[in-house]
Image: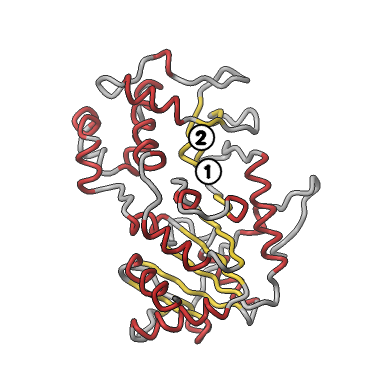
Amino acid sequence: MLFKKIRKGHADWRDFLCDTPARDYVFQKDAYEDQINRSAEFIKDADSVIIGAGAGISTAAGIQYGGKRFTDNFVEFIEKYGGQYMTDMYAAGFYPYPSEEAKWGYWSKHALMNRFDPPALPLYRELHDIVKDKEYFVLTTNVDHQFYKAGFEPERIFATQGDYGEIQCQRGCHQKVYASEALFKKMDEARKDCLIPSELVPKCPVCGGRMAMHLRCDNYFVEDGAWHEAADRYADFLEQNKGKNVVLLELGVGFNTPIIIRFPFEKMVRENNSYVLIRLNMDEAVVPESFGNRAIGISGDMAGAITDIRREIS
């Protein structure tokens, strides 16, 4: 069952997951223009659209974790900790910082650059234009808040993996998260030699222990009331759209954490004859051959493809 209530009335997060990959992946050989035209027609004819978004969409939108954007903005960290470890923002997040002052020296800057400072990016705005007049829902593993900034209704977004704008007890001693923008700005202003002052290191208000970014990286990830409400709304949306013409618009989801979006989307297409999968991915746009004309896999420039689909729809 895709939808099930647990004892306290909330949807069970595990019911959304699927760990079974397809066995008949193929790169489609259709002409790009035909893929765009078919995608636009599917979306126009759909009763609803479910967007599944991974890291690739934010990369395509301009939030790149490596390259010049990293080396220009994190030079002090590269020089202090070594270029062999500080290769990009993702790798830097896993560095074993020697103190809380060092950890928050890095993470406060990371969050400001990727969550708070960027405006709503054009790719996200175009995507919103595509679905704004449709029944839609967004399932995303991204934590950069771009969907919210671009005008997507907060009640139609389920950000499963957390938010760069929040912190939690590192040991998850209580199910609550805390807004962090003001604190991160203070940290950024006070940082010296990659370290923040000790008085700015956050402590758990309940157990007095360490705090961490609100990111799903271990079994202590906090699923607070707002998280469960979003999961419930997603479950309700799935239930209400059974048997309807639904487009699953998958954007930038690779094989890093495929059990959250990629494999579940394929499972839904297998189980619902009226569902269509449109998969946009720079390098991994393979789709199950058995889906036939109910799957479109568009490789390459995602930003350009979204622009072309929007243009074709309008």
Image coords of residue 14 (percent x, y): 65, 54
**CB-based contact (under 8 Å), mark 2 and mark 1:** yes
Q: Which residue is mark 1?
A: 162
Q: Which mark is residue 143?
A: none
Quadrant for residue 96, please give it.
Answer: top left
- Give the residue displayed 39% in from the left and 37% down from the top: 111
Image coords of residue 178 (percent x, y): 55, 30
The foreground one among 222 and 118 is 118
Mark 2: which amino acid?
Glu
Outermost top residue: 199
Q: CA distance from mark 2 to mark 1?
A: 8 Å
In the rendered structure, the answer to whether residue 200 lies left or right of residue 189 reads right
- Give the residue displayed 26% in from the left and 38% down from the top: 85
In this view, 274 is above or below 219: below
- Give the residue displayed 41% in from the left and 74% down from the top: 309
Look at the image and name its color scheme.
secondary structure
Q: Which residue is mark 2?
A: 166
Q: Quadrant of the N terminus?
A: bottom right
Image coords of residue 303 (percent x, y): 34, 65
Q: Is residue 254 visible?
A: no
- Give the residue displayed 38% in from the left and 67% down from the top: 281
In this view, 52 is above or below 148: below
Badge 2 marks a residue whose secondary structure is: strand
Mark 1: which amino acid?
Gly
Q: Quadrant of the C terminus?
A: bottom left
